[in-house]
Image: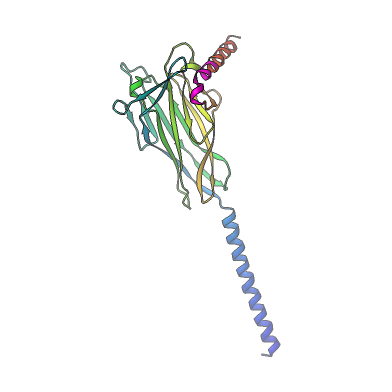
Amino acid sequence: MKPYQQERSWVSGKTIVSAMIGIALWAAAIAHASPFYSGTTTGIFSAPILSGINIETDGSLTFLDNTGTAVISGVGTNTFNSGAGDPPPPPNHTTLQFSGVAFSGIAPDEVFKLGTLSYTNGSSFVDSVAFGVTLTIAVDGSSVAIDPSVAQLTLLATVNGGVDPFLDADFVTFDVLPLAFHVFEGATATADLFGSIHGDPHLVISGISLPDGQPGFLASVPEPGTYALVLTGLGLLGFVAKLKRGR
């Protein structure tokens, strides 16, 4: 083979190798930059808080330590029960339940439905209730490991006056969300939780919404010193709702 032919053959081989490396790097960069996630969300309740505040009908706060008297079940599962009544009017305890969903083709930071959170506002003795619980939402069945999202839920119970459902509504607050989930006395309401997969990757809870027709509402999380004002505002909401129903 002549020298210029050997040189041309070497250059061609080098070009092909470089092109193959470039294609491989490009494919790796695309795969790294734009992964798509699939799996199924699951939720577990843990670490119940057995001391906290109870909201009186005038908005004042009572601190209770139920460490020795709380009645709870479902720790380590997707359904957490708190409280007990005697006699037990249905429902005689509070229930939190998380139901996960399957998802596919979710890009990083794309907001999607994580599942639903149902809350049953039951009648219970105040010394039998819990005041909070941790909710861990994880992803099963994903081809890559996704770190779970961990949220602290605070359960704020109101003393039932039996006059206005807005005033008697218990509510759930999240340490990662600005909205509280209120549920009327004796009812079960179901809210949708939303989030995304971010960073390294890990699951993030970013929002909550309440479908139409649910026996509850969403409102801003109040400061502890403003509960009396909040209850006054909720009473006005109840009054307006009654007027609308009467038309």
Which colour style is shown?
Answer: rainbow
Q: Residue at x 62, y 62 (%)?
A: 26
- Residue at image position (47%, 32%) is 117
Q: Quadrant of the C terminus?
A: top right
Image quadrant where one finds the N terminus: bottom right
> Foreground residue, 76 or 129?
129
Is 8 left or right of 182, judged from the image as shown?
right
Q: Main secondary structure of the magenta part?
A: helix
Residue furthest right as drawn? 4
Residue 179: image location, x then y, percent: 53, 29
Q: Residue at x 51, y 51 (%)?
A: 200
Residue 140 drawn in magenta: no
Q: Position of 191 compared to 26: left or right?
A: left
Give the left or right position of residue 148, taking residue 199 as reference: left
Q: Residue at x 53, y 49 (%)?
A: 37
Q: Position of residue 118 (x, y in %)?
A: 45, 29
Closest to the observer: 65 or 151? 65
Residue reaching furthest bottom?
A: 2
Residue 10 at x, y = what percent?
65, 81
What stretch of residues is rendered in magenta?
A: 223-232
